Amino acid sequence: MSYLVAVPEMLASSAGDVASLGAALSAANAAAAKPTKAMLAAGADEVSAAIASLFSKEAQAYQALSAQMEAFHQQFVQALNAGAGLRLS
């Protein structure tokens, strides 16, 4: 038999902490978005252009994944808050 103890105040506090972490990550991702998406080639040769293009594509893929992770994070925080609210009522 398993037991689970959920303290509403701790759930609410954890939700606040997780939300703060998410805000910091969102700010860092936003700050990194522009410089990483628009990388300039280091030189005028084909290899430099190809590498810059590769890094730009990877940055765009990262930003897309980051947006999905942010949506999941928001749902997780909502679930923590909902769990705390259920225990309080």
Image: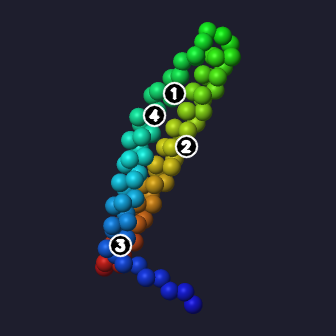
Going by the numbered disc 2, the residue's amino acid type is Leu
Mark drawn on residue 65: 2
Residue at the (55%, 33%) spot, across then down: 60
Mark 4: which secondary structure?
Answer: helix
The residue tagged 4 is 32
Determine which quarter of the picture holds residue 14: bottom left
Specify the color scheme. rainbow
Going by the numbered disc 1, the residue's amino acid type is Lys
The residue tagged 3 is 10
Whole-number angstrom distance, CA of label 4 to CA of label 3: 33 Å
**Residue count near mark 1 (Cα–Cα under 10 Å), binned few <14, some 14–19, many ≥20:** some
Going by the numbered disc 4, the residue's amino acid type is Ala
Residue at the (46%, 55%) spot, across then down: 73
Whole-number angstrom distance, CA of label 1 to CA of label 2: 14 Å
**Residue count near mark 2 (Cα–Cα under 10 Å), binned few <14, some 14–19, many ≥20:** few
Mark drawn on residue 56: none
